[in-house]
Amino acid sequence: MQATGACQKRALRFAADTGAMVGCAESHPAPVPVATPGANLKIEVRRLVTGEETSVLNFLNRRPLRNIALIGFIHDHGLESERNRGTFYGCFRNGWLIGVALIGHFVVLSGTEETVPIFAEVARLWHEPEIRLVLGDQEATEIFHRMLHQSSCALRVQGKESHLLYALTEAADDSVEIKGLRRARPDEADEVAQAHARAYYEQLGIDPLVQDPDGFRQRVLTRIEMGRVWIVRDDEGIAFKADVSFDTGEAVYLEGLWTRPELRGVGWGTQVTKTLCRRLLLVYPVVCLFANTSDQRAKAFYHRLGFQSLAPYHLIRYAKN
């Protein structure tokens, strides 16, 4: 009975995210009351503050997988924390919450279509110098970008990419248990940072140890201390690394999967990833990750692992002029 219940829970959780696109523009979410605006205001936008987490999470959990980043930030740090690297805002219509946004280094939005230009105006007025990444559906991200550049903007587009959100609900039954897979320790933080920087550079052509060495190393250490970094070591050092960047209690989001180059192409990395996913699925109903749609090798790899594509996303990267 427990197994059946778990399967049903996974199916329901997965099905909740297969409707209209929610990365930035959700069709018609039922409103969730959080605060009542002034009597003469139909729509307002304001910062969300400590104490409103439960109501905001109730809103975001209507699409738990597509909102996994926003939910993860709140679970980890609350609504008000420098570790979010941004500010949470809520958009309200007649006192009902219709949109949530994290605006800062990352811009991640969830809500009705009418909230996108409102959040974009907030970003343009108060957060323009901070913004480096905007994630959502293509129409919403382009609207956000267009409004951000209505005035002189210090940001220039570094790249635009299409991504797919993948979800895994059942572990592969043909996998071999890889010994040595474990959580990284704080004393391994420097090695982990080097491996993560290599993965980042391979995917994006950007070396975070050059751009922000101190901040990057601190974020790696924090994630290790939270038990979110998984590694396999051999005589040459770290052979495999993967990060759980978000943990909502209902799902985890993986990023930074990296296998040392000389160990690739023989199936070992696949077996390690299967081992990791099997362990995570013993605790969480769903494992999620993103893949660039132009990366055919990565897409084929995730399909072999049993991941299903859930929704398309659009990513805009900015760099300082």
Image (cartoon, rainbow, N blue to C red):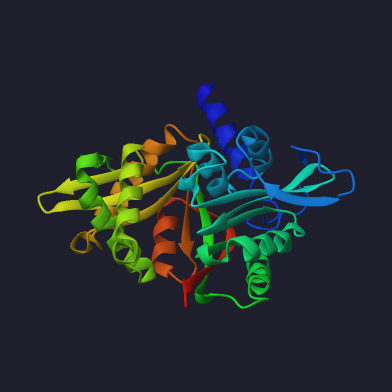
Pick whichever, 169 or 62, lies toward us.
62
Pick whichever, 184 or 303, lies toward us.
184
In the displayed structure, 178 sits above or below 159; it is above
**x%, y% of residue 160?**
52, 73
Pick whichever, 199 or 132, lies toward us.
132
* Residue at point 55%, 33% (across, down): 7
In the displayed structure, 179 sits above or below 317; it is above
Looking at this view, name the residue that lies furthest to the top.
1
**x%, y% of residue 299?**
44, 63
Image quarter of residue 316: bottom right
* Residue at point 66%, 39% (across, down): 56
Image quarter of residue 24: bottom right
* Residue at point 60%, 43% (across, down): 64
**x%, y% of residue 65?**
57, 46
In the displayed structure, 87 sits above or below 76; it is below
**x%, y% of residue 291?**
46, 61
Q: Is residue 267 visible?
A: no
Q: Determine whether, in the image, residue 57 is placed left or right of residue 173.
A: right
- For the N terminus, give its image quadrant: top right
